[in-house]
Image (cartoon, helix red, strand yellow):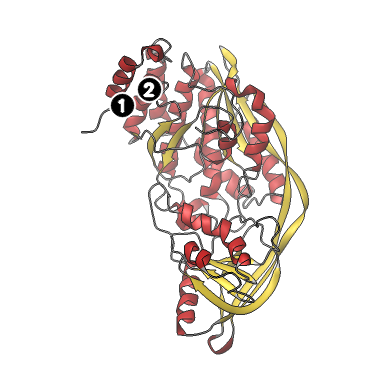
Amino acid sequence: MRITLLAATLALLVANPLQAAQPTRIDAKALTQAANLRDAVLKDATAWQVTESLTTEVGPRLAGSEADARAVEWAKAKFKALGYDRVWTEPVTFPKWVRRGEAAQVLGAHAQPLRVAALGGSAGGTVEAEVVRFADLAALEAAPDGSLAGKIAFVDYQMQRRQDGGDYRNGGGIRGRGPSLAIRKGAAGFLMRSAGTDTSRAPHTGNTRYEAGLAPIPAAALSTVDAAQLARLVALGPTRVRLALDCGWDGEYTSQNVIGEITGSKRPQEVVLIGGHLDSWDYGTGAIDDAAGIGITMAVGALLKPLKPARTIRVVAFANEEQGLWGGRAYADRHAADVANHVIAAESDFGAGRIYGFDSSARDLQPAALAQIQQVLAPLGIEWMPGKGDPESDIGPMTQRGMAWAWLGHDGTGYFDLHHNAEDTLDKIDPKDLAQNTAAYAVFTWLAAQAEGGFGSAPKAAGGGD
């Protein structure tokens, strides 16, 4: 039998009287306001308008590019146009990677082109070599050292659809670790089936890293269709491929975290933080990843301003998430001494599918307050799912320093059809789903801002767990 959140709350309070002595409270007025807000936001178009504006007026926003700078100016102007009380930027410096071109083709009797995307961080160069196929990363890891000398390693793992996107740990893991493993086996180049769940000729990019001390090799992702084609060719017999990547590092670049605030009316020093990341990869227009998150969270702050929230609402458009959480890490470094005043945070960085689950690091500490929040989220089709969530991307470094977090889980069943590829465009977002997302973030943010008491934020050494 499933135990309800309220029943679990009562059980915990009985078992732990010390916890019961200092519960966080949300009053009836705030709950009524949240319910009214929820219903109003479902009919509001602000999040859609912001998302449309970013994807249309700026388009793809590769970190370090000219469009990155335009995105920063766009965000500053948009915060101001939405009526935020305070808008500022904080610098984020990182190595600049550039993509100039890429191509691949099968050579010999079965000559034909292949659609590829250089992985972010890949070395440039041209390799012509025989392809050796591996079903997954474990198979590559098991290959004898030196067995791939002068060859191209091809990892042909097919990601599976999951609501929580959980198989990305495999697909994304191949992208992250595969090139270094291939180098250790002697390979001259690396190919992988895109970390995607689609069937298309649109390859998915994404970041990779080379282990220290290894000489980088060209590394690219094949579209899922081209990966299947290459697998069939390899099955016919020895297959040679030419992989040519024109890309690489080009010094350093300084972008900006762009921050907007709605000043708290009663406890302005206490912050409820929400946000998304401003950058994107360079094939589509970064609609689900992560213009939607920017649209949702910018809209929430603007929609809550007339209600005069007790705590400050801070919305952060983070810089360069895609290439290593640079904006999130810079924010955590800059605000480490102020963890206790960051009451709780939630990020939107998993598309615009309907939100189906709610969780928080405060699940054991403040179950009664979370039960109240869940009560208002429930009509949106959102379930309490303790232990299922985690802090999304850019807020992770700050949560490692002790900031409390909440998770509003998007349905990711179709997310990896579009993730990091040319199909990530505005038309893939359902306006009704985006409005449901915005309503959920508005409810959470409002009730966190009005709550009397905290959710467990307290300083701890960087790198600590949840």
Q: Secondary structure at mark 2?
A: helix
Is residue 60 found left or right of 133 in the rendered image?
Answer: right
Q: Secondary structure at mark 1?
A: helix
Q: What label does residue 322 carry, if any?
A: none
Q: Residue at x 64, y 48 (%)?
A: 58
Tell me whether the residue at label 2 lies in contact with that at label 1, contact meaning CB atoms closer than 8 angstroms: yes
- Provide residue 29's location: percent of width, then percent of height: 40, 13
Residue drawn where x is 60% and y is 45% of the image: 54
| Amino acid type for the residue under numbered disc 1 | Leu
Q: Name the residue nearer the viewer: 365 or 185.
A: 185
Q: How many marks overall?
A: 2
For the N terminus, give its image quadrant.
top left
Residue 268: percent from left, percent from top: 60, 16
Does residue 193 show up? no
Q: Which mark is residue 367?
A: 2
Where residue 150 sits, quadrant-wise, is bottom right
Crowd around label 2: few <14 · some 14–19 · many ≥20 (10 Å): many
Given the current orientation, which residue lies at the most extreme top position? 21
Inter-mark Cα distance, 2 to 1: 8 Å
Instruction: Report the residue marked by disc 1.
Output: 5
Q: Residue furthest right?
A: 251
In this rendering, is residue 152 above or below 32? below
> What amino acid type should be assigned to the residue bearing mark 2?
Pro
Residue positioned 64% across, 32% down in the render? 332
